[in-house]
Each structure stands twice: as structure tokens, then as C-alpha cells.
Image (tube, rainbow, N blue to C red):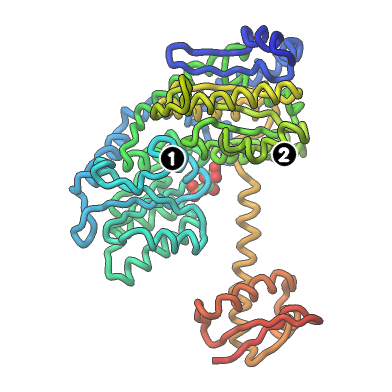
Amino acid sequence: MNSKMLEERKKKYCLTDGTIGFSIDVAGMDFKDEDLNALSAKFADAHKEMIRIESGEIKNPDENRKVTHFTDRAVYPGTSLFADIQNFAEELRTGLIKGCTGKAIENAVINGIGGSALGPQLIQNAIRGPYWNELPAKKRKGFLRIYFLDNTDTAELKDLLDAVELDKTILISISKSGGTQETKNNMIAFRDIYSKNNLDFAKHSCAVTMIGSELDKYSKAENWLRVFPLADSIGGRTSETSVVGHLPAALAGIDFKSFLQGACHMDAWTREPDFRINPSYLLAAMWFIAGKGKGDKNMVIVPYSDRLILLSRYLQQLVMESLGKEKDLDGKTVHQGLNVFGNKGGTDAHAFIQQLNDGRNDFFVTFIEVLKDFINIPIEENISMSDYLHGFLCGLSNALLGKDREVIRMSVREMNEFNLGLLIALYERAVAYYAELVHINAFHQPGVQAYKLASKSIISLTKDIQVALRSIGQFSGTAKELLAKAGLKAQASEAEGILAKFAENSSLRKFNGFKITREWNDEKGWVYEITVL
Ligand code: PA5
């Protein structure tokens, strides 16, 4: 596309809200007016479905749930829940609530995964930056340092425990379902560490979960500091504008009301039925046309702001967990999805951008620019550091367009809560609308359930193998031989994985009644040695 054509197209395909300084420009995408016209009946149907979502119909049929994140956030600031969270954060900040030894709470550990972690991580980094926890309390105005646990990985846990003082820390366990194993494991680890250190865990623990969940019942029975309810109709990956995003943000003094105002501003704009002037619909239409309604092109997200480095990770989950589906709403096998990756510009120009320029043309890129600088750094006469970042963005965009690569550009005025709210709401609605265009349920995640079930059988094999190892006595042999001797029915490779973990952790982990080591044998592979204790 030459620059004259691009300028012409921008007149039509660049949407701007001058009141807030936001714009989205899809002129660099490869489509014609006719392509949009041909799809207008489909777009109109999808819009009707969007109205059904907001009018409270069941739009997550598998889970028999309403989908209320678009509507709930408009009223949330006026609720008592909102006020409770603000008060709780203030009581922690001012030291009114203290830890069990009487010391002020300085650190919050946010324990959650997927939709219960990615939004809080994004807003924390976007608004507070990567070095918030290193600032002295005065610079943080007494707000808490924020840490995250979002896995069941001992490395993550050990690194965190090395960094925080337990009696100055609270654990915030966030789990909509209240039964997610990764989150539960971190809670158990914390509970036991507090108990070993003679500290009262209940005075250092809070939960955000659905009423009646396992976590809800447990935390209430144990008299935790606070338990905040999350509505059943708000899904994990669309929960950032609810209590899930609010509590961690409030603890760091982030202006959540302004964040919600940004989201609501975008909601008002994106309720517009005409997809040509509705930024979410136009965005989804671009995804649909670029990928021929089958996700044939990858979505590359490149924000030109280090503060948005987690945006691609956040959108990867929002888009791929919502749109990556085997079946459509009629039960037909469709294997839908849209790949999302990205990191940050201009750094990416020294990494994967080489392939975007010269390699496979299997993507469209979305550049997001933040116009206002954090500080002014002159580099040479009349040129500041950020002029270079802008120059690199435009240069890359032009170079890509010159090679018939597809480009979407967005810009926000500055990095603040309001503008982050705009971006999140923009993408949330684009995802929901795209799901309607391809006729799938964006709000369930059957693939996640499938992996959970498959993992359960490995945990059960792990238990069975330990029972077997205690009873078979002295033994030396391969995993396959061990299974045979113990009379266990399992794949040798699965048993091998479990035994390998046992053997490599023999110095750390005490097994009841036996010790296990392994040695490599060129003919047999790994040979396990069981010693009865
Ligand atoms: O978007 C989703 O639904 C998931 O990513 C969930 O957020 C994730 O599985 C964690 O679930 P929960 O909040 O129930 O612990």
C-alpha cells in the first residue's frame, strides 16, 4: 500500500475520540469497503447477540451463566463492596490493621492464576512500574508492596519467601471457583510456613472468591481477615474490572474508580451498532477479515511503552482462552482460535520483528502508542529520547506496510488508569463480538477442565507409586520393571517422569520408608535404586 492510498484510507478508517485523546486506525489492514459490506448482515446479527449479553440473558450456555462484566462495572463504584475494599486498603496503609505480632503490614502477595492474576499484574506494572516494591514506604505513600504467585512452582515460592518478612505480609488468595489447585497449593504452603513460625495465618490472609466455593467456606471457617465475594456471572479473564482487579490495585493505591471510568467510557462508545464507527466491532471485523474467520493470521501486539509490556500476555489469555474452541455453539467441530504474541516496541525491533519484516506474512500487527512522556530527556538538538521511540514506531510501521504486511495502530494520550480501562474494555468487547461472528461461546474453557482431569490421574499415579515403593522392598531396575514388580498399570513414560522427580529430589524430600536414586545405563536407560529405610 503506498503512502497516498494510506492517507486516503485513514480518513475513513481511523476512529478518534478527541475528548479523551484515543484513536484506532485500521487503514493499514488489507480490506476493501466491499469486504465490510459483504459482512454487514453477519455484523448486525452479532450486535443483536451483544445486546442479549447486556440484557442479562444466559450467554454462557455450557455453564448456564449470564455474562455481566460490561454492565456490573458501571455500578460497581457505588456498591458497599467497593467501599469495603477501599476501607480495607486504607486500614492496612495506615496501620489500623496490623499483623499478628503487632507489626504493620507492608507486603501483599496476590495468589491467583490465569484470569485471577493477569489483570492485576498488568495494571500493577502499567500504573506503578516495575520497581514499585523497591521504593521506600514514603515514596509509596504507605501503600503496600505487591508480589504475585501465579503457579505451583517451588522456584516462584522460594524467591518470594526470600524477599518478604512473614509478619509484615498478607496473602490475598483470588480464585473465582475457589478450587484451583495451583492457588490452593500456595495457600497451603503459606499456611504451613506461618504455622511453623508460630504466626497466626488467619490474621495474614484474605480471599476473593464466589460465595459457597471451597475457598469461601474454608476462609470463613478459619476466620480470615476478610473474604470478598465475586459474582458468578463474571468470568476469570474478564474479571479485571471487578473485585478481582480492585483489591490488588487498591492495596497499591491505584485509582480504580478512574480505571472503571475509562472502561465505561469505552463501553458507551462500543455499544454503537454501526460497526464502522464502533472501535471494538471494527477491530473484531479486522481480525475476522484478516484471518478469513478462521484465525489464519496471528495477532502481534506491540505496545510502544514498557509499562504495557504485560499487555500481550494479558491479551493472549483473553483472546486465546476465549476464542480457542473445538466446537461452535451448534456442537460442530470448528477448531477456532487466534494466536496472540508480542512484547514491546522498540525492543522487539531487535528480536522477532526481523521475521515480521522479511519472513512469513502470517500476521497482523497492532502498535499501541502512549503519547505523553514520563520525563523529557533531550538527546540531541531539538530531539528527545521519546522522539526516537516514535520515529522507530513510524519507521517500522511504514516498512511493514511497504512489504504488504498488515498494521493496526492505536494511541492513548498517557499511561494512566483511565486509559488502561479504555484498552481493556475495547478488547473485551472485541473478543465477545468476534466470538459471535464465528459462532462460539467465548465465556467457557472446556480445554482447561480437560487438562485438570488429565493431571489428576498423574497425581493419583504419584500416590500409587509411593505406596508401591514402600512395599516392594530393596529394588534395582527400570521404570517399566518397577511397574511390573509393583503390579501397577500405567505407561512406563509416565512412571519414569514421576520416578525421575523423586530421585532428583532425594536430598530435599523425605519419603516415608524408602530412599530412591537413579543412574544412567547405556543399554537400559535410567535404572532406579530403591533402598528400604
Ligand atoms: O479465565 C478463566 O476463566 C481462567 O483463566 C481462570 O481465571 C483460571 O483458571 C483461574 O480460575 P479461578 O479463578 O477459578 O481460580
Residue 67 at x, y percent in the picture: 52, 32
Q: Is mark 2 within 8 Å of ligand 1?
A: no
Location of the C terminus (image quadrant): bottom right
Whether residues under marks 1 and 2 lie with C-beta atoms below 8 angstroms apart, the answer is no
- Residue 2 or residue 232, whichever sits in front: 2
- The kind of residue on which mark 2 rests is Lys
Looking at the image, which residue is at 62% across and 7% down?
11
Taking the image as shown, residue 409 lies to the left or right of residue 509, namely right
Q: Is mark 1 within 8 Å of ligand 1?
A: no
Residue under pointer 2: 327
Of the two numbered discs 1 and 2 on the same chain, state the one appearing first in sequence: 1
Q: Which picture quadrant has residue 487?
A: bottom right
- Mark 2: give few (<14), some (14-19) or many (20+) Cα within 10 Å: some
- Residue 533 or residue 273, whichever sits in front: 533
- Residue 141 or residue 441, whichever sits in front: 141
Looking at the image, which residue is at 69% across and 73% down?
495
Residue 31 at x, y percent in the picture: 74, 17
- Mark 1: give few (<14), some (14-19) or many (20+) Cα within 10 Å: some
Residue under pointer 1: 125
* Element carrying mark 1: helix
Q: Which picture quadrant has residue 171?
A: bottom left
